[in-house]
Image: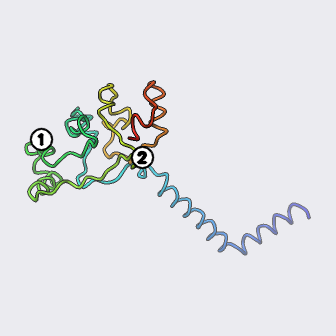
């Protein structure tokens, strides 16, 4: 069959099957779009919305508030905790006190309700992690938590053993599992 005839036959086949070809291509496009939006879009790494849109970029970045001011338990407890309502109102009783989002914080305080912050940092249940060991070794918060001072919303972070072991090897720190994290 000569090339001209083959081209005419292909064109005829495509013309006769325009509908199925269009729907097949549309299905492929929509599937790829869904996969991108669900798994790969920038919004997938933004992190969960908080009950009050707290910005680490503003507080830790522009205002240079130390991590320990809002997370004071990191140095003395097994759980660094989330800031209590009173901690937020320490400043926000005077700074933008009438902002609608700050009024939500006042409502939590007035009803004696803790702010329902959404947790973003996770370690496996069998890990007994203590921040104090890292604080005493002058490990900066950013080494594990990233440059939070550049982020408005923190992404979810699942700390896995490989992340910790790599850092411990790099710093020549204790790698004895039962001496550190698993007791």
User: Horizontally, is 3 left or right of 96 in the view?
Assistant: right
Picture quadrant of residue 63? top left
Looking at the image, which residue is at 35% across and 35% down?
Answer: 147
The spot of residue 165 in percent (x, y) is 47, 34
**Residue 150 rendering spot, x and y as whole percentages:** 33, 37
Quadrant of res 114: bottom left
- Residue 34 horizontal side relative to residue 73, left or right: right
Marks 1/2: CA distance?
Answer: 31 Å
Q: Nearer the viewer, residue 145 or 165?
A: 165
Labelled disc at residue 158: 2
**Secondary structure beneath disc 2?**
strand
The N terminus - image quarter: bottom right
The number of callouts visible is 2
For discs 1 and 2, the disc positioned in front in the rendered view: 2
Few, some or many residues within 10 Å of mark 1 (<14, 14–19, 20+): few
Q: Measured from the top left, where is residue 8 in percent x and y?
A: 81, 67
Q: Alpha-carbon neighbours of circle 2 within 10 Å: few (<14), some, or many (≥20)?
A: few
Q: Which residue in the rendered view is the most extreme toward the right?
A: 1
Residue at x 40% of width, y 47% of height: 126
Residue at point 42%, 43% (across, down): 159
Residue 144 located left or right of residue 100: right
Q: Is residue 83 above or below residue 3?
A: above
Depicted 66 relative to depicted 183: above or below: above
Q: Is residue 64 above or below residue 13?
A: above
Relative to 26, 1 lies left or right: right
Q: Quadrant of the C terminus?
A: top left
Label for residue 91? 1
Query: Relative to the observer, which residue lies in front, 77 or 177?
Result: 177
- Could you tell me if the residues under marks 1 and 2 are in contact, i.e. CB atoms within 8 Å? no
Q: Percent x, y for residue 122?
A: 37, 47
Q: Quadrant of residue 134?
A: top left
Q: Earlier in the sequence, mark 1 or mark 2?
A: 1
């Amino acid at each position: 069959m000569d090339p001209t005839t083959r081209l005419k036959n292909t064109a005829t086949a495509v013309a006769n099957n325009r509908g199925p070809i269009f729907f097949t291509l549309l299905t492929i496009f929509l599937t790829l779009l869904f996969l991108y939006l669900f798994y790969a879009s920038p919004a997938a790494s933004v992190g969960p919305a908080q009950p009050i849109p707290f910005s680490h970029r503003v507080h830790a970045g522009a205002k240079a508030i130390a991590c320990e001011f809002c997370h004071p338990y990191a140095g003395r407890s097994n759980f660094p905790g989330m800031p209590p309502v009173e901690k937020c109102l320490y400043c926000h009783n005077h700074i933008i006190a009438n902002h609608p989002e700050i009024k939500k914080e006042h409502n939590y305080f007035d009803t004696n309700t803790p702010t329902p912050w959404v947790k973003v940092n996770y370690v496996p249940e069998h890990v007994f992690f203590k921040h104090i060991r890292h604080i005493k070794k002058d490990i900066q918060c950013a080494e594990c938590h990233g440059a939070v001072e550049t982020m408005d919303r923190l992404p979810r972070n699942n700390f896995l053993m490989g992340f910790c072991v790599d850092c411990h090897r790099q710093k020549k720190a204790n790698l004895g599992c039962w001496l550190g994290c698993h007791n």
